[in-house]
């Protein structure tokens, strides 16, 4: 049978074959301009030389073009399919997350020789196999085709080119901005995390059935009485952000990192083992309540050992979904209009992998307008925002915002999710920093003892936000809080591009 993969369910079916399914051997390339198709053996696509030696229709045409056709086709097929596609589908079977991910992949064409099985559970297996075939773990389109079970692939050349070109286009403006910018200088030394102490606590909260797990990091010596909260992203955990917390605590801050139980890495494991459902859209609001509950607990003395800390002036730092949480707390109000209008449009020029998550939030948006006036500033690293927050949402901000985006982020690409929304916002002293070579995962602290490439930036932003006092309030004409440096990184150059973006 022939299965068209123009829909998410169809692609789930083609990747849900039994283990005995045949491996694809033949590719049919659709040439839209001449209304024709050419057959090629998959083995002939291993290299330009293999295609020139081949016996297929495409090989004959390649020889007639002196190898030019083959070089162009192989350049396309060896473009990376973002490894984040595999990461997103790990726990997304049968959910809006999977459906949105598959909308992207389904643009590439048709797989033939498949029987229907709509579970979608083989998607992860095929993508894992493709990733394993790549030296850097980032599969190409060709490696993905080699991993898909079936008889043959009908490749829609124009659609594949469109999707891959769009992904490159969505970081072009960020590359241009970085090329014209002067990177921030780097600090001489980082604070020593040896001067901090870490504890693990639980907090009973009214909006969760079980106590909220917290990591609390405090200075060993003199504390400054100031509170910072750090919110992790989807299927992540506080562990990957303790480095940020340690660097901040070494400066005197009390830092609290909540584990968001409905969307953390433990919940991901439960989904994979069939013991839990995927993240609920209600998590969009529940995560913000998690952070506000920390402020409440500090105010009432409910966190053991946390004393002398002011809960009325708080800085929130977040990554990915955690960054979206931070923006909600800063006063930005989500709406469903863009989500409903654009989520199913595969041709939308701004479509990107972060829509996978944003489009799964639709039914939770009406409960997610949760700001906290105690939050004076936020640092939002790689937040999915373009669909969730409408144009003009920055007018609602009650806290100053530092937006950070990596130039090589395929999951939350810098142009549609950072540069364009920021450029359309009313200038109120908020700032946009781009990181050359930063992707969605290497900007986290991870296990780096120095807190990773963003630690100096986040420490500087936090220091300046508290030092500003009442002037931290966003307002028209407000001067920037973040100075030119030294908060950069020698590993990954970064620059404040605020003026160049807002001048357009």
Image (cartoon, helix red, strand yellow):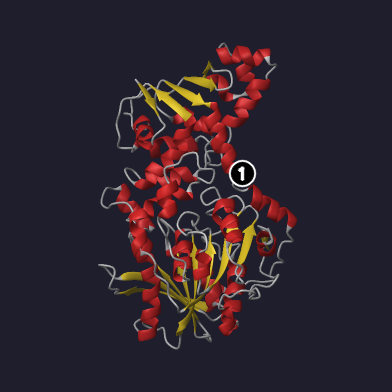
Choose top left, top right, bottom left or bottom right for residue 307.
bottom left
Along the viewing direction, whichever of 12 and 282 lies nearer the viewer:
282
Dot 1: element: helix
**Quarter of the rendering occupied by the C terminus:** bottom right
Task: Give percent across and percent down for residue 21.
Answer: 35, 24
For the N terminus, the quadrant is top left
Picture residue at 54% right of the left edge, 54% below the top: 417
Task: Work out whether 223 lies above or below 362.
Answer: below
Q: Against 464, is 230 above or below?
A: above
Residue 24 visible in image: yes
- In the rendered image, residue 96, in percent from the top left (x then y), is placed at 36, 46
Extreme-bottom residue of the structure: 308
Location of mark 1 (residue) = 169
Name which quarter of the figure residue 247 lies in.
bottom right
Q: How many marks?
A: 1
- Percent across and percent down for residue 146 are 47, 28
Where residue 295 sits: x, y (%)?
A: 40, 78
How many C-alpha atoms fall within 10 Å of the one at disc 1: few (<14), some, or many (≥20)?
some
Task: Name above or below for residue 426 compared with residue 154.
Answer: below
Question: Visible in this render: residue 91?
Answer: no
Q: Tell me which residue sits at (74%, 61%) in the image.
A: 182
410 and 202: which one is in front? 410
In the image, taking residue 236 as reference, residue 38 lies left or right, namely: right
């Amino acid at each position: 049978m022939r299965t068209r993969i123009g829909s998410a369910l169809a692609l789930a079916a083609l990747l849900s074959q039994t283990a005995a399914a045949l491996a694809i051997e033949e590719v049919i390339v659709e040439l839209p301009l001449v209304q024709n198709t050419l057959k090629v053996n998959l083995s002939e696509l291993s290299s330009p030389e293999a295609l020139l030696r081949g016996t297929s229709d495409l090989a004959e045409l390649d020889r007639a073009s002196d190898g030019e056709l083959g070089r162009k086709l192989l350049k396309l097929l060896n473009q990376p399919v973002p490894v984040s596609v595999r990461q997103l589908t790990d726990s997304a079977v049968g959910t809006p997350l999977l459906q949105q991910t598959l909308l992207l992949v389904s643009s590439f064409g048709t797989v033939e020789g498949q029987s229907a099985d709509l579970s979608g559970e083989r998607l992860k297996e095929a993508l894992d196999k493709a990733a394993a075939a790549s030296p850097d773990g980032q599969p190409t389109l060709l490696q993905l085709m080699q991993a898909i079970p079936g008889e043959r692939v009908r490749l829609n050349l124009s659609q594949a080119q469109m999707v891959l070109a769009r992904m490159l286009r969505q970081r072009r403006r960020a590359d241009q901005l970085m090329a014209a910018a002067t990177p921030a200088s780097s600090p001489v030394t980082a604070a020593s995390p040896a001067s901090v102490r870490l504890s693990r606590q639980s907090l009973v909260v009214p909006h969760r059935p079980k106590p909220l797990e917290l990591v609390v990091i405090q200075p060993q010596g003199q504390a400054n009485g100031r509170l910072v909260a750090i919110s992790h992203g989807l299927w992540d955990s506080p562990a990957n952000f303790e480095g940020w917390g340690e660097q901040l605590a070494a400066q005197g801050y009390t830092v609290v990192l909540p584990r968001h139980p409905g969307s953390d890495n433990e919940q991901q494991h439960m989904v994979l083992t069939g013991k839990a459902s995927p993240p609920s859209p209600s998590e969009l609001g529940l995560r913000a309540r998690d952070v506000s509950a920390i402020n409440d607990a500090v105010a009432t003395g409910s966190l053991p050992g946390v004393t002398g800390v002011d809960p009325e002036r708080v800085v929130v730092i977040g990554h990915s979904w955690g960054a979206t949480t931070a923006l909600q707390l800063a006063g930005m109000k989500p709406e469903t209009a863009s989500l409903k209008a654009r989520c199913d449009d595969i041709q939308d020029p701004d479509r990107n992998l972060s829509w996978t998550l944003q489009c799964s939030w639709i039914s939770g948006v009406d409960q997610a307008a949760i700001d906290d006036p105690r939050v004076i500033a936020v640092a939002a690293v790689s937040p999915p925002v373009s669909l969730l927050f409408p144009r003009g949402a920055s007018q609602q901000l009650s806290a100053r915002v530092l937006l950070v985006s990596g130039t090589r982020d395929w999951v939350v690409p810098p142009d549609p999710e950072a540069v364009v929304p920021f450029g359309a916002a009313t200038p109120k002293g908020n700032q946009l920093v781009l990181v050359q070579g930063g992707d969605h995962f290497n900007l986290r602290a991870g296990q780096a003892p120095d807190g990773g490439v963003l630690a100096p930036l986040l420490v500087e932003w936090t220091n300046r936000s508290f030092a500003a006092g009442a002037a931290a309030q966003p307002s028209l004409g407000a001067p920037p809080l973040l100075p030119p440096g030294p908060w950069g990184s020698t590993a990954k150059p970064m620059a404040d591009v605020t003026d160049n973006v807002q001048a357009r």
